[in-house]
């Protein structure tokens, strides 16, 4: 049977087109113009970059969340443009690369409309994982991860049942402070934290990599995506970023997914899953050139944000939403120079202590917890 991928182009709504994931996705589209057509592009506020993309791709829908669109452009403006793009009638796939909890409503809208969501917005599942997965089941939509770690797990599982899985092992590069003494880390500058040794990403996710908050978010996301309990999800440091995750099965077999560190491969796989197409554009993995692969335990005393996030996931309810919101606000303050690096976990811990036991049974309760956590961190920036 001829694959549907070879018959007609796939219409894609790309949310967050000017960020690191968005621009990587557009490179994938450029490599396969006969297969992928961006029917909608949205950006937060990088007007000039978005205008260049629009001139190249000529999408049917363009939206900008903040900032003023060019006069007479016909662009849509405001947060609602994310939902409008996610439900565009010509889109079969929504690639959600929005940073932070702002991507939640667009994911839910796409899933209610029965769309496939290629999800790079991990905060969506952290804030409201149970709601999101229930919405996917009810609306006939599908959630396919774009994160390299979760894409790796998806490929290793290859349709196996959750009860066949003993452990998920998520790898972490260790970030820029992997070898720093614990006492020195708290005084790290913004420049230090943005100097990631392996990946080139947006500023927020790069800071999350430096604190290891991103691994906490990924553990929570993996729990919801694959139905594996928290006590069977582990994190290990792997500086080379070649092995993206392992899956250990109940018979003792361990399957790993390897590849050079590039987001273009997991983006392509998310767009075509469960099938594959030729030519990802990513350099082929050369095991000889790669040399030795090293693995280390996480220094949890040096990176307390990881434990804070995983404990929030275990607690459930509103705790993950509180963790995520507090982290977003603390990272933003650090980037603005109103918070030190060492104060990021302190502010998160304070928000969790005050708000983690709030109810989180409904989307409304989760969003209220999110807002309260943001206010909690903001109110203490001068302390």
Image: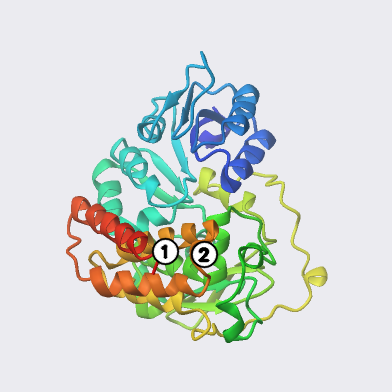
Q: Would you name the residue on which mark 2 appears? A: 208
Residue 294 appears in which quarter of the rendering? bottom right
Q: Which residue is drawn at 62% across and 37% down?
A: 26
Figure quadrant of the C terminus = bottom left
Query: Is there any visible trace of residue 88 in the rendered image?
Result: yes
Q: Residues within 10 Å of mark 1 (few under 14, many from 20)?
A: many
> In the image, residue 69 lies at what x, y percent?
50, 24
Q: Nearer the viewer, residue 351 or 218?
A: 351
Asked if the residue at tag 2 contacts the one at tag 1, i.e. Cβ–Cβ closer than 8 Å, the answer is yes
Query: Is there any visible trace of residue 246 in the rendered image?
Result: no
For this view, does 212 lie left or right of residue 308? right
Label count reads 2
Q: Nearer the viewer, residue 64 or 87?
A: 64
For this view, does 324 lie left or right of residue 23? left
> In the image, residue 227 lies at what x, y percent?
34, 66
Q: Nearer the viewer, residue 52 or 294?
A: 52
Q: Would you name the residue on which mark 1 appears? A: 327
């Amino acid at each position: 049977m001829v694959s549907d991928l070879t018959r007609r182009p796939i219409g894609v709504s790309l949310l967050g087109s000017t960020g690191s994931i968005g621009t990587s996705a557009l490179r994938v589209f450029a490599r396969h113009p006969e297969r992928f057509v961006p029917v909608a592009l949205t950006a937060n506020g990088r007007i000039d970059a978005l205008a260049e993309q629009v001139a190249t791709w000529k999408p049917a829908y363009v939206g900008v969340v903040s900032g003023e669109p060019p006069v007479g452009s016909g662009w849509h403006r405001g947060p609602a443009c994310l939902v409008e793009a996610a439900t565009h009638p010509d889109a079969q796939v929504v690639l959600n690369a929005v940073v932070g909890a702002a991507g939640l409503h667009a994911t839910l809208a796409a899933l209610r409309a029965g769309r496939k969501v290629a999800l790079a917005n991990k905060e969506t599942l952290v804030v409201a994982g149970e709601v999101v997965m229930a919405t996917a089941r009810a609306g006939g939509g599908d959630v396919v991860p774009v994160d390299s770690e979760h894409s790796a797990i998806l490929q290793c599982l290859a349709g196996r049942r959750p009860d066949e899985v003993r452990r998920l092992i998520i790898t972490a590069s260790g970030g820029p402070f992997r070898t720093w003494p614990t006492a020195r880390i708290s005084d790290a500058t913004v420049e230090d934290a943005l100097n990631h040794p392996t990946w080139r990403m947006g500023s927020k996710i790069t800071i999350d990599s430096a604190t290891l908050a991103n691994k906490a978010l990924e553990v929570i996301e993996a729990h919801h995506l694959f139905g594996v309990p928290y006590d069977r999800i582990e994190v290990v440091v792997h500086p080379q970023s070649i092995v993206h995750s392992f899956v250990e099965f109940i018979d003792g077999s361990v399957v790993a997914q390897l590849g050079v560190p590039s987001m273009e491969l997991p983006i392509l796989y998310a767009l075509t899953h469960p099938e594959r197409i030729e030519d990802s554009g990513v350099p082929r993995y050369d095991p000889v050139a790669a040399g030795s692969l090293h693995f280390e335990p996480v220094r949890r005393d040096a990176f307390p944000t990881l434990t804070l996030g995983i404990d929030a996931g275990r607690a459930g309810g509103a705790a993950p939403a509180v963790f995520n919101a507090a982290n977003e606000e603390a990272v933003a303050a650090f980037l603005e120079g109103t918070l030190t690096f060492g104060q990021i976990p302190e502010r998160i811990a304070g928000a969790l202590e005050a708000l983690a036991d709030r109810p989180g049974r409904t989307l409304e309760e989760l969003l209220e917890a999110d807002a309260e956590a943001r206010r909690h961190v903001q109110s203490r920036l001068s302390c």
